[in-house]
Structures are given as C-alpha cells and as structure tokens.
Amino acid sequence: MLKEIALDAQGDDQHIRAALRDGFFLVRNTVPDGLLDEAYAQLGAFFELPAEVKADCRVPGANGQSGYLPPLAEKGEKGRAPDWKELFHWGAPLPSGHPLRERYPARYPQPYFPDHLVPGMSGTLGELHARTARFQLDVMRRLAGALGAAPGYFEEMLADGPVVNRATWYPPMAQAPSADHVWMVEHQDFDLITALPRATAAGLEVRMDGVWTPVEVPEGYAVLNVGMVLERLTGGLARAALHRVVAAPGQGGGRLSLVQFCHPTPWTVLTPLRSCTADGEPDRYPALTAHDLFQRTMYRINRLEQP
C-alpha cells in the first residue's frame, strides 16, 4: 500500500520521510482529468500513425528529449534486449540567448509538435506540461519542509530546469521481436521526482521489501516516485526505488502512459542537505552536477547521441 502525501497538511514530516524511503507515494493530482483524457486521445492517434510517418517526427541532437523515438531505441542497464516501447517527449522552450540553453543545448531542444498530423496537439500537450510542472513544484515545496530545507530550496534549482514530459506507447507483447523483450526493464529514474498519472492499462510495478508490487493509480491521483537526484540530495534518506513496466501473462493489448520528469537545472551541484545527514555519518555520494548525472545515465541506457 503506497503512502499518501497531502499537500495542504501540516505536522506530518515523519510520514513524508517514510514515504520518501519507500520511493513511491500518492498525491492527489491537480491536473484536470479532462485534460489527461484529451492528451491520451491525441497521443493515441499519433502512435497509431504509420512507422514511416512517425519517423519524420524525430528531433536530431536532442538525446530523445524532444519528438519521437521508435521501438527498441532505449535499453536499460539490466535489460537483455531493448525495451519494447515507443516514445514521444516534449518540454517548454527557453528563449534564445538564455545561458542554460547556450551552455546545455541538448538539454533544451525546441519542442516539436506534429499538429499537421494530430490537430491541436501542441495546445493540449503544452497545457499539460505547464499544469503538471506546477503540480510537481507544489510537491517539492511540501517535501522541502519535511526535509528541513528552506521553503524555496527546490524552487531555485527548478527555475528554468529542463523538465520533460514522456508519452510511452507499449505495443502488445505478441508483436515483440523476441521473448527477451519486456515493456520496460527495471530501472531508477535520474531526476528529483517523477509524476505518473493514471495510464490506460496496468503494468507498472515497484520493488518494495524485495517483492515486485503492482502499482494502481486511483482516480484523481498521481503516483510520485523518487529519482536519483533527490536520493543524492538527501544522502540516501529518500530512495530512488526500482520499478518496471511489464505485461501480465495473457495481457493482449498495449499500454499508453504519461509521465513528467522533474529535472533541476543542469548546473546544480548535488551535495547532500545537512538536515538529512547525522553528525559523524560517513558521506555516501561524491558531489557532481545534475548534468553529469544525466550524461552518465543517458550513456548507460544507450540514449546519448554523439556530436
């Protein structure tokens, strides 16, 4: 049973810390259900397009952070074969000349929306990005208080951060090239937190107490999972839990999901919060930047494009 965190509650810091140790928790979603339904309808129409049409929606040089990626493009560190999924990513643009865009161009690609193929897609997905980003910022404000940080601690590192949305279409497993493929192999996310509203079918599982546990998102809620960045910032108090997406035996259809990765600005130095470490406790992680962690992880999952 996942713990629930209430954004407007006070005095439950120990409950929140326990939820962070689990790595997965529930929060009532502030993104309207109607907007989710509209996004799923448009993305479903996009993924149903012919492969050659979708192939023209790739964005070179974006490390898959904008536009379309075909099946078998991503392979997890523990996967025997590439994941059986298709991806579409988008975020919010930064103005030209912005120092973050100038210094980290691959982290801030221009969003690409195929409105010529699915009319209205840019408006729907742009609004979904903005509303989900506000929701995640509210979550991080609540976590800051429970972790003993100043209220604006995470706000500064998220200001103009490369927050990115991912739509994933998991085709029916009967169409997979071999029995070695799964929808998404076990992994940890490499952001602060990830917001996962309800998907169109089951399949998400989290590793808790050594057991793979199915995760069901109740109506009106989102699952939030801890990423590697937050684990490092808390010295291991928060746990980037292992999770995966697998089809149940006999599950014949596919699955469409939406998530948003809450990334801090690439130049953020990931040093642990003093309020999360006890005096005399040995340091667990060496300091590195959020960009270094991103690059290392993208390389390990075969998503780092060469210049």
Image (cartoon, grey):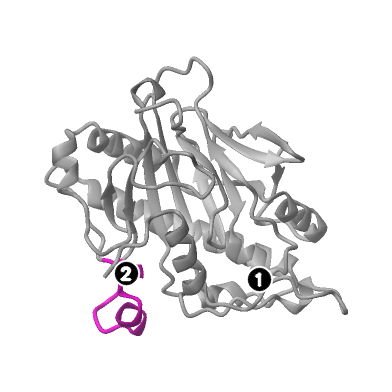
**Boundaries of the magenta span:** 93-109
Task: Identify which residue is drawn at 49% across, 73% down.
Answer: 292
Residue 303 location (% of width, % of height): 37, 56
> Where on the picture, by quarter, is residue 164?
bottom left
- Image coordinates of residue 228 in percent, x first then y, are 60, 61
Mark 1 neighbour class, 10 Å CA radius: few under 14, some 14 to 19, many 20 or more: many
Residue 98: within the magenta? yes
SS assignment at label 2: helix
**Mark 1 to mark 2 CA distance (whole Å):** 24 Å
Residue tagged 1: 233
**SS for callout 1:** helix
Inspect the image, locate mark 2, and give the three-letter code of the amino acid beneath it. Ala
Residue lying at 87% horizontally and 79% vertically, measured from the top left: 279
Q: Is any part of residue 118 visible from this angle?
A: no
N-term mark: 1 or 2: 2
Pick out the residue farthest to the right.
280
Q: Quadrant of the N terminus?
A: top right
Residue 106 marker: 2
Name the residue nearer the viewer: 218 or 207: 207
